[in-house]
Amino acid sequence: MNQGARMTLTGRVALITGASQGIGHACALALARAGASVAVAARNRQKLDELVAQISAAGGKAAAFAIDVSDEEQIKSGIKSALAEFGKIDILVNNAGITRDQLVMRMKRADWDAVLATNLTSAYLCIQQVIGSMLKQRWGRIINISSVFGQTGQAGQANYAASKAGLIGLTLAMAREVASRNITCNAVAPGFIDTSMTAALSEEFKQNAVKTIPLGRVGTPEDVANAVTFLASDEASYITGHVLNVNGGLLMG
């Protein structure tokens, strides 16, 4: 699936969480297109199987692992299976995420816990499971999908914004911990991206949102996947502890 002089990930193995739809789905396709073998993880086995079939049909290599990232045991057993299947994991994309929006005064503790467990704690657990493989070969890429709202905050999303800001802190700490072993850790902070998560928003809200974006359009999952593919490549070997904004200019500076 490699195309000429493009960034190549041939020989690399990538694990993507939340790969059944949206940004994770686009990341899996982009990394496979660049030549990586991909382990795709999510709760929805049927969607994962369809994704694997799509990658295989295009000449790539992929395998599906049904993992609910809010469950530590599923993360451990799922990643163990992926390591057994592929022999190593070079690239980890922590993308799985949910929202449970509510004003803080009305937010239930369960909704706080669910968002933090899925969006933030899972990233730490996934890193813990793959880091041994990366340390052994002295090469690795950890890419955490944060959000512009982890940088600016958003009313009604205290849990989501906290989890995404937490991912940035996790990214910086990990970057320092493993840099001496030739492992980089970066975050990608998408702005307003056209996914099923944003599809639930009203048309009026979307139109108003586009007015605040200098590039004048909503982003696509592929816009984010291209940034992830770059950070996963050898071309990005001197970039670590960085938050790459993919937001059409919504937040600058």
Image: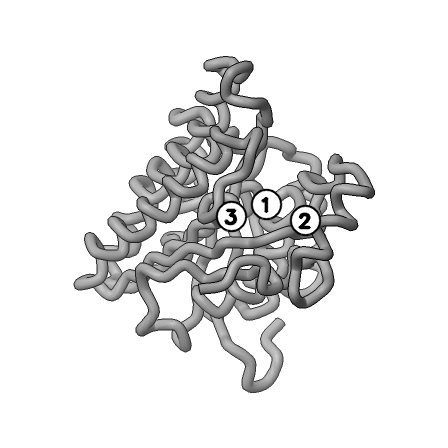
Q: Marks 2 and 1, how far apart in space?
A: 8 Å
Q: Which residue is mark 2?
A: 51
Circles 2 and 1: CB atoms closer than 8 Å: yes
> In the picture, residue 180 is in which quadrant?
bottom left
Amino acid beneath label 2? Leu
CA neighbours of label 3 inside 10 A, class few (<14), some (14 to 19), many (20+): many
Amino acid beneath label 3? Ser
CA neighbours of label 1 inside 10 A, class few (<14), some (14 to 19), many (20+): many
Residue 211 left/right relative to 105 = right
Q: Nearer the viewer, mark 3 or mark 1?
A: 3
x 49%, y 28%: residue: 115
Q: Is 101 drawn above or below residue 11 in the view shown?
A: above
Q: Position of residue 252 (x, y in %)?
A: 50, 63
Q: Is 126 drawn above or below residue 28 in the view shown?
A: above
x 32%, y 45%: residue: 170
Q: Secondary structure at mark 1?
A: loop
Q: Residue 238 versus residue 208: which sits nearer the camera?
A: 208
Q: Assign the C terminus to one quadrant of the image.
A: bottom left
Circles 2 and 3: CB atoms closer than 8 Å: no
Circles 3 and 1: CB atoms closer than 8 Å: no
Q: Which residue is mark 1?
A: 19
The mark that comes first in sequence, 3 or 1, is 1
Q: Assign the N terminus to one quadrant of the image.
A: bottom right
Residue that extends furthest to the left in the rendered view of this protein: 180
Q: Which residue is mark 3?
A: 147
Q: Is residue 121 at least partly visible in the picture? A: yes
Q: Secondary structure at mark 3?
A: loop
Q: Marks 2 and 3, how far apart in space?
A: 24 Å
Q: Is residue 55 at least partly visible in the picture? A: no
Q: Position of residue 100 (x, y in %)?
A: 58, 26
Amino acid beneath label 1? Ala
